[in-house]
Image: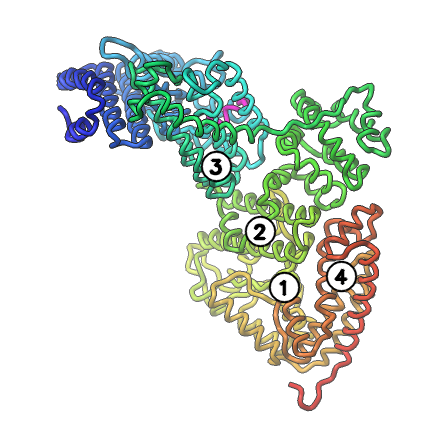
């Protein structure tokens, strides 16, 4: 029976009268047949498919259904038909058994809910040997294959009513050697260890479509790490690009735009839009779950929203995809043809008229600019081939000399050893192939590196430590600009080179320009750190936070080496990353603890940061100076299944937080945590109540503890708890503390420090006389004696004291130079010695905003003299009768 929607569509589509007349005749016969009782499942599905085709075609042509609605209806039917076919096949063989233990995983357009009128479906049939119903004495593998064959027969068999769906099972693991239905454990093992790179792209659109959905969900969850890898696999990207090139070659007759153009496989066609989205999803989706949208247009929108592709490209490609798919549907409407090629002559005119255009020429004019835009966007994806140096073994020495290596013989030995597979990471055929592909560009970049010999030696050590070098080579091949940056990092930054040797996937984080932007705010960083896979446990969170922190810190260090950021901004970025890690891990540790022990009524953990963490200016090597406090009544008890007294409760919780922040996991280390600045130092309790903390600071703390308190800042706890701690700190600094001879005690402490911690070298910006420690002491003594200028950020405190005439104006520039030198030195001169390479000296000068090395040394001498003078002035100051 015709629905009102059909009547409306028919009225709106009068221009398609001949076409509709044929469809309406078919629909009348179909409706009559569907009314018959006890219709066999196969015929019922075929008739339903005909009715659906009519409904969708009418809605499409009449403008009632957009592309999304068309593809959704077609996909919903395919899912339903496949599900009913599985249930029917099992019921035929074992009538009394529940239809379980057999599942269809949809890939391709069915997986992304984008089926067209004549699409094949591309499922994978999996079964569970433990739950699939079998007949007596029947082998379960045989039963699974028979169920699969019956499903194919129900869907594909043709008669006068047509067929239901074409089914293509060639996307299953090793289709040439495996049965059509595969045990689920065998499939999991295949995707974990043997699958090819292109199969990752296919699984971007994987979805449980029919059958035992719980079984399917278990499989999808198991293979997620195979699909969405945090460490980028540019082999997969390269293979996808190669597939497209092969498609272009194989379908050469469909590449030229015009009649005969292949809307799906042609240059600038549907497949290139799909691959454009999938390549970016493979690159970034392992780190950002929001990019894992199966549908092409959804994926483009998500990639644009995340800043991974240009928003204009995303819009243009989505528009082109909509148009190309719509015209593809028009072509397939005629005689249900499984084709993607534009016809010629009168047939093209008919397709055009189905789209509401006058003729084929108008249709081609509509398509041409869209096709060109797609082709241009996709062509930009192809990795730039390295300009090849002639790496003939007989000429290797001459080639390396020409490339710029001063000691070509040593370079020859290193490169030859790589090609011979000296290290395990270089021994496989895949590693050797990948090495040869990138070697010309790599050697060229090393030769042009600021310190080629150093870069070569560090790269050699990197290869020695790598478990596998294939992905590093493919990454460099796909992103040639990274090769030069890698050479700079290896030349200048031993700290980063060592980290890269331990975790080569850190290089992944530098693939786009966002790596050289300032890291986000604390809330955004914490959200990224909390974004673990659904269902992940506490240990998985610890690993995830370590990976995120490692990537952020590595990228921040690379910004200094590349000259892309001010070291002062990088220091603030390091601190934001650390604070986000504290927030994330302390919250997670508290939640875990509460599950066992409940909560202490009215009490909570508060974390106070001091030192560089409190001052929001960390270096790459900084530890975290923390004090743990708790609010509420220390005599209270927690309310959980295993209650604890408040002091013991928060002590154990603080220990857990310290472990979360400091203990190495499979993902590596995080931060050293130093709690020796707590009340009574290392001999005191790990955690004290706010009341105890306040009493200690007011009555017992020494001058050095009050100096440390000038940089105190609450970094964890509720707003009320933080405010309470900060009020205590402010009162103590303002004078609610023991009367002591601050200058004399500070001078004695500084002298003791100088005896036990001398400068490491001439670039030790921290410990040199007149260095950063002397400046910090001068600031803190001035703050405590004058009771003003308090701010955890040293630069802000200096500005305030200079404004009041308590410090010399030169201290502003002194702090900027010393702080920049410290942050930079931790990366490029961790031993505090002058670098031997002129290029590294130039990098340090650039980082501290000076033109050259000689100017830096002269300025450093001048600054140290001014800081030393300020230090002496600060400890000599005595208040006048009118001073506060």
Q: Position of residue 118 (x, y in %)?
A: 33, 19
Mark with earlier residue (1, 2): 2
Q: Real-space Cα distance between discs 1 and 3?
A: 43 Å
Task: Say which residue label 4 marks.
Answer: 766
| Mark nearer the N terminus (3 vs 4) | 3
Pointer 3: what residue? 313
Q: Main secondary structure of the magenta part?
A: helix
SS at badge 4: loop
Q: Depth check: give the residue in front, 770 or 357.
A: 357
Residues at circles 4 and 2 in contact by the CB criterion of under 8 Å: no
Q: Are marks 2 and 3 in contact (CB under 8 Å)?
A: no
Magenta residues span 194-203
Between 354 and 396, the one nearer to me in the picture: 354
Please tell me which of labels 4 and 2 falls first in the chain: 2
68 left or right, relative to 608: left
x, y (%) of residue 164?
28, 16
Identity of the residue drawn at 51% across and 67% down: 722
Whole-angstrom CA distance, mark 1 to mark 4, is 15 Å
């Amino acid at each position: 029976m015709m629905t009102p929607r059909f009547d409306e569509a028919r009225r709106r589509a009068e221009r398609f009268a001949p076409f509709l007349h044929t469809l309406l005749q078919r629909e009348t016969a179909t409706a009559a047949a569907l009314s018959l009782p006890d219709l066999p499942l196969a015929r019922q599905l075929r008739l339903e498919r005909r009715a659906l085709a009519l409904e969708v075609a009418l809605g499409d042509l009449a403008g009632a259904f957009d592309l999304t609605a068309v593809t959704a209806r077609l996909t919903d039917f395919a899912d339903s038909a496949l599900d009913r076919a599985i249930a029917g096949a099992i019921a035929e063989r074992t009538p009394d058994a529940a239809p379980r233990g057999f599942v269809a995983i949809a890939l391709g357009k069915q997986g992304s809910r984008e089926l067209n009128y004549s699409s094949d479906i591309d499922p994978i049939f999996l079964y569970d040997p433990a739950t699939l119903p079998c007949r007596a004495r029947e082998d379960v593998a045989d039963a699974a294959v028979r169920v699969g064959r019956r499903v194919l027969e129900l869907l594909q068999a043709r008669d006068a009513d047509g067929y239901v769906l074409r089914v293509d099972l060639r996307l299953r693991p090793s289709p040439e050697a495996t049965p059509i239905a595969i045990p689920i454990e065998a499939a999991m093992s295949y995707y974990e260890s043997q699958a090819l790179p292109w199969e990752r792209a296919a699984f971007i659109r994987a979805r449980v479509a029919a059958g035992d959905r719980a079984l399917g969900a278990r499989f999808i969850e198991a293979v997620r790490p195979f699909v969405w890898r945090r460490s980028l696999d540019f082999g997969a990207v390269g293979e996808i690009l190669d597939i497209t090139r092969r498609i272009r070659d194989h379908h050469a007759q469909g590449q030229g735009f015009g009649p005969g153009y292949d809307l799906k496989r042609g240059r600038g066609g549907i497949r290139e839009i799909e691959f454009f989205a999938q390549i970016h999803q493979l690159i970034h989706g392992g780190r950002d779950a929001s990019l894992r949208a199966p549908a092409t247009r959804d994926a483009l929108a998500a990639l644009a929203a995340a800043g991974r592709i240009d928003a204009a490209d995303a819009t243009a490609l989505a528009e082109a995809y909509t148009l190309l798919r719509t015209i593809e549907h028009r072509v397939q409407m005629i005689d249900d043809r499984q084709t993607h090629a534009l016809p010629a002559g009168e047939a093209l005119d008919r397709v055009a008229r189905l789209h509401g255009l006058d003729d084929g020429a108008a249709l081609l004019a509509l398509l041409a600019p869209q096709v060109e835009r797609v082709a241009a966007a996709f062509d930009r994806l192809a990795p730039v081939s390295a300009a090849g140096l002639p790496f003939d073994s007989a000429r290797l020495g001459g080639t390396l000399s020409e490339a710029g290596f001063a000691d070509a013989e040593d370079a020859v030995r290193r490169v030859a050893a790589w090609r011979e597979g000296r290290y395990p990471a270089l021994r496989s055929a895949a590693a050797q192939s990948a090495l040869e592909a990138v070697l010309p560009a790599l050697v060229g970049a090393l030769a042009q590196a600021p310190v080629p010999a150093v870069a070569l030696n560090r790269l050699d050590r990197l290869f020695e430590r790598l478990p596998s070098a294939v992905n590093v080579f493919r990454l460099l091949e796909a992103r040639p600009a990274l090769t030069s940056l890698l050479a700079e990092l290896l030349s200048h930054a031993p700290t980063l080179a060592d980290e890269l040797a331990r975790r080569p996937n850190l290089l992944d984080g530098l693939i786009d320009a966002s790596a050289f932007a300032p890291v986000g705010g604390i809330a955004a960083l914490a959200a990224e750190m909390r974004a673990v896979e659904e269902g992940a446990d506490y240990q998985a969170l610890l690993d995830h936070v370590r990976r995120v922190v490692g990537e952020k810190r590595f990228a921040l260090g690379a910004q200094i080496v590349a000259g892309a950021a001010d070291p002062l901004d990088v220091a603030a970025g390091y601190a934001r990353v650390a604070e986000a890690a504290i927030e994330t891990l302390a919250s997670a540790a508290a939640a875990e603890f509460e599950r066992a022990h409940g909560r202490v009524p009215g009490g909570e953990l508060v974390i106070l940061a001091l030192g560089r963490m409190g001052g929001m200016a960390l270096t790459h090597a900084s530890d975290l100076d923390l004090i743990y406090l708790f609010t509420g009544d220390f005599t209270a008890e927690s309310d959980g299944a295993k209650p604890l007294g408040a002091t013991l409760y928060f002590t154990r919780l603080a220990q857990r937080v310290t472990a979360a922040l400091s203990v190495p996991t499979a993902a590596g280390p995080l931060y050293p945590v130093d709690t020796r600045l707590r009340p009574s130092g290392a001999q005191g309790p790990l955690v004290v109540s706010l009341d105890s903390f306040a009493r200690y600071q007011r009555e017992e703390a020494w001058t050095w503890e009050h100096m440390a308190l000038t940089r105190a800042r609450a970094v964890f706890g509720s707003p009320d708890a933080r405010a309470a701690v900060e009020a205590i700190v402010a009162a103590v600094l303002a004078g609610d503390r023991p009367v002591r001879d601050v200058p004399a005690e500070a001078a004695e402490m500084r002298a003791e420090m100088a005896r036990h911690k001398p400068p490491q070298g001439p670039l030790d910006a921290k410990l040199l006389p007149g260095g950063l420690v002397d400046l910090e002491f001068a600031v803190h003594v001035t703050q405590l004696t004058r009771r003003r200028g308090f701010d955890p950020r040293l630069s802000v405190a200096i500005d305030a004291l200079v404004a009041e005439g308590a410090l010399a104006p030169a201290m502003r520039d002194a702090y900027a130079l010393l702080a920049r030198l410290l942050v930079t030195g931790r990366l490029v001169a961790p031993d505090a010695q002058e670098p031997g390479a002129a290029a590294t000296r130039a990098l340090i000068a650039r980082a501290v905003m000076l033109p050259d090395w000689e100017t830096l040394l002269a300025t450093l001498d001048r600054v140290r003299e001014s800081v030393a003078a300020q230090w002496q002035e600060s400890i000599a100051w005595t208040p006048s009768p009118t001073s506060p």
